[in-house]
Structures are given as structure tokens and as C-alpha cells.
Amino acid sequence: MKKKNVRKPDNSLPDYRSFFEGVKDDDKVASKLLKNFLATNVREFIVSTLLFIVKHCAVWIIPLITSNVINIATSPSSHSVSELFLNGVVLVLLVVQNLYTHVLYINYTSRALRGIGAGLRNSLIKKLQQLSITYHNELKSGALQSKFIRDIEAIEQLLHQLIFSLIPCIMTIAVTVCVTVSKSLTVTAFFAIIIPINVFVVRMFRKKMSKDNRTFRKEVENVSTKITTMLEMIPVTKAHGLENTEISKMETSLKHLKSAGITLDRSQAQFGSWSWVVGNLMSVICLVFTGYMAYIGKLSVGEVVLFQSYFSTITGNIQSLLNIYPEFAKGTESIKSVSEVMISDRIENNDGKIRLRYVHGTVRFKNVYYRYPGSSKDVIKNFSLNVEPGDCVALVGASGSGKSTVMNMIIGFLHATEGEVDIDGKPIEMLNLQDYRHFLAVVPQNCILFSGTIKENILYGITKYTDEQLERVLELANIHEFTDKLPDGINTMVEEHGGNLSGGQKQRISIARALMRDPRIIILDEATSALDNISEYHVQQAMAGLIKGRTTFIVAHRLSTIRDANKIIVMENGECVESGTYEELMKKKGKFYELKTLSEINS
């Protein structure tokens, strides 16, 4: 049997997972990530900086030309009219070139930043696909949505501010300080006073704003999680008349979010008002100082205008730096949020593992124990089982007896805490699980469908097939029974979670998906539980053909559906308490017989 045909990622987007490697301290995540972004995209940032210098040079030179024009106008005897017009022509050329260079700068820089944002989302998706199933079970979907949407948007905004605000502000301050130094060291010394004053303002609010950002981010994740849960629970909520209860619960969460948001806004407002007052007070002092210098003959009138313009430029840019600090605080907190997923070491690592080209279907459990992380209780105890290729094994027992845990260990979602699970004589921990699962098909109790056509759901992950193969699968799963009644047949769109299909129809699509994979090992977790008697008969007939020559594991509550199994395992409290064929267990009149009798009474 050839290896399954699988769609491969195109790898056209950057992968930043390595940026998070070795980072354990939250305080270092943001700085390391930003350094790595700059290092990886250094060419783009150099070109962006050069384009900014060209397009922005008019802003830096306008005060110089303004000073020249004032000095020419106030001292006509020392200057000619041609000097006045020459300054005007230079200024016009510098202004007009911005029409082209500014658009070029935005286009180039935006492509680089959008690429980083897409790459970061791509990296998060790849990391999520690497993480173990136990991690995903613990990860709340609402919180994950918040990380994927809100937090990455905040990181994009942080990078946007870095490129479009921080670097231009620093360059502008550097240019104006250099010109000021060349003109007057006394005025330069005065300018230098504003830097420590503004640093003090940042330090005064930094810790509180970081704390408030973290609190607000946690509340957003909490509300997002609760909204996701609320939407999933709507049928149950309405069926029991609990709408007001859900509204009350959500109102409490929204009040907490509102309170956290108001606290954050208040911190940002206090920070903004302090930075504005300090900046404008320093501008007033500068005006008086340079005016005094001109009064005593140390500066010309044009130089007073020049220095006041430059001081306003410096304070304005420092003000801009201070104003974007809240965005930086929000962005760094979002980096820490995303890093909670990115630095997790609970991954399913297939590097260096055995690559499978074929699976025969031999499965061995050797004195297996399993205990969930953080628990002191074994949910599987001393479990042993030998399954040969082509065998059909059924697991029965009460809820919580360990049936699904055994199935998850066969899939490789869970690994034994003691003992060993072998596939074709090799410990499952040594296998490349991604390759192994290409020969595996799972039909869960609660089938999972995505928004797409019925055909797309059946062909999920299959890139090459023939019309004959598809038609055979449709017949085996009895799909035509309901698709022939639909206007678009198998091209009918499936609503979210299969809302426009019945439980039996969804289950048959899930079974057809498994059939299409032509697996060597099949896991049926209550695969026929949602089917009516007629549909169940057709599917059972299909399964009889499917499981022939393939290793099959069945979890069943309808004990009549497993009559033909080669071996039935009766589970109780994580242990195998009985095993044998249907006839053997019925003759024994033990635990299986009790379960069968109870099921007949309940039916």
C-alpha cells in the first residue's frame, strides 16, 4: 500500500517559531522577538530608513530655510534677492519630491510589516498543530481566538509604531540636535535637559500601565472564552429557559472587562496629560530662553525662529514617543500572551522518529498504565491486549471505564505512563505519528464537520482520487439516501457544525470520510450511535466490507452492534475484567452479560 497522498504547506510565509526558542523569562520575550524581527528583516528596514530620510528631509530643512529667509528679509543690505528665490526653489523641490517618495516608502514598509504579521500567524498555526492533544484540551478556544486576533493585531501595531513612529522620531531628533550643535552649544545644552525629564515621566507610569494592560488582556480572553461557551450552549440554554441566567453571567464578566478598560484608559490619560504639560512647559521656557539670548545679542532673529522650530520639533517627537508608549506596553503584553503558546514544550515531536511506509495493523498493549498529568489516579491499570492484523476488537463498559483513553493511546494522543504500546512491533513513542496516522481512520461519536460542501468534508485531506473511488464510498456510507433529495447533491454547503444536517446524516459523512482514506487501522467510537435502524443497517453492511482485512477497534454502547467482533474487552475502572467473543461472554454470564441485559431493558 502506498503512502497516503497529503497536502503539504507551501512554506511561502516566514516561520518565526525559532524566535521563541530558549526563552523562559517573560520579560525577555518581547525584546528578543523585536531584535529577531529587525535582524531577519534588516534589508527591508535599511531601505525603509533610506526612503524615510529622502521623503522627510523637507521637514528638517524647512526651519533652516525659514531662518535664512528671515535673516535675508531683516538684513537686505547684506543679501540679494536671488538668495531669497534660491531658498524658495530648494524648498519647493524638497516638498514636491514627497509626492513620489512617501508613497514608495509606505508601500515598501507596509509590505514588510504585513509579511511579518502573516508570518507570525503562520507560526502560531504551525505551533498549534505541533502541540499535544492534552494541551489543546486544556487550552480554551476563546482565549486562543483572542491571542490569534487581538494579540497579533497588537503586535502588528507595535511593529507599525516601531517603523512609522519610533525610528522616524529618533532620526528627526538626531538631525535637529546635530544642526543645533553646529549652531550653538549653549542652546544644545538647554535642549539636553528635556530628555531626562521625559524619561522620568515614562518611568513614573511604566509599571502601572504594564500591570493595567495585563489585567485588561486577561479580561478580554476571559470574556472571549465565555462568549464561545455561551454560543455553544444556546440550544441547551433556550431548551431550559435559562436565558436570563446566561445574560447575568455575561453581564458580570463584561462589568469586569469594563472596569479593567476604564482603569487602563485612566492610566493612559494621566500619562498623556503629564507628557503634554511637561512638553509645552519646556517649549515656553525655550521661547523665553532663546528670546533672552537674542536680546543680549547672542542670537539673530532668524536663529530664534530656527531654535524654537527645532525645539518644538524635538518636544513634538518626544511627545509622540511618549504617546506611543501605551501602544508599546500593549504590544509587549500581547507578545507575552502569544509566547504562552509559542514557548510551550508540550509538543508532539516527530523529528528523528521512524517514518512508516506501510502499516500491517498489529497492536500490542503490554501492562499499560495511564495517569493524566497532575493526577495521582491511574485511569488505565495493567492493561494488556494482543491484536493481529485484520482483527475486530470491541471495547465496552460504563462511561469513565477507560475505553476512550485506550483509543487515544492507539491514535498516539496519549502515551503510557507505564508499560508499552506497540504498533507492528515498534513502540508508538518511536514512530513518526504524522506518518502513522496516514494509515489510520477515526470516526468519533460527535462527528466534526467544517463549513464547506458535503463533498469537501468527505475528501478532507485527500488530494488525489478517482470518481469511481468517491462513488463507491458514497454508496458504502449510504450518502445518496439523503444527498439525492438535496438541490445541489453532494455539493450542498454544510453550515457551521453541520447545523443543516441531521445527526445520522452527519455521522454518515464522517464515516464516508474514513472510508475515503482506505485505512489499515480503524477506530469507531460509537460510529452508528446517531443512526436510525435503516441507516444503521446500511452502514453496518458497509463496515463489514470496510473492516475486512483491516484492524478495527470499536467503542460501543449498543452491544448488539459488536456481535461479529473477534474479541470483546469489558472495561471497568480502567481494567479489563472480561474478554472473549460475543458467544463466549454471553455463556459466561458475567459482566458483559449484565451490561447486555441492562441495555435490552433500557431499550
Image (cartoon, rainbow, N blue to C red):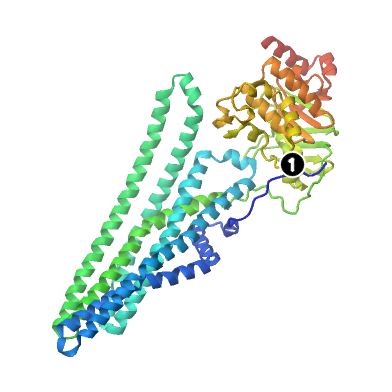
**Image point 78% across, 40% down: which residue?**
419
Nearer the observer, 82 or 67: 82
Q: Is residue 35 above or below residue 228?
A: below
Residue at the left extreme, as displayed: 295
Q: Residue furthest top?
A: 601
Residue 394 is left or right of residue 131, and the answer is right
Residue located at (44% from left, 72% from top): 50
Quadrant containing the N terminus in the rendered view: top right
Give the position of the C terminus as an image quadrant: top right
Q: Amino acid at mark 1?
A: His
Residue at screen point 44% across, 44% down:
218
Q: Position of residue 561 (x, y in %)?
A: 75, 19
Q: Is residue 530 visible?
A: no
> Mark 1 packing: few (<14 Cα in 10 Å), some, or many (20+)?
many
In-image side of 466 versus 157 (left or right): right
Please give the residue where the numbered disc 1 appears in the rendered image: 438
- Is residue 391 among the parts visible in the rendering? yes
On screen, residue 52 versus residue 589, left or right, reads left
Residue 361 occupies which quadrant of the picture? top right
In the rendered image, residue 240, in percent from the top left (x then y), is placed at: 47, 19
**For the point 48% across and 51% down, which residue is it?**
152
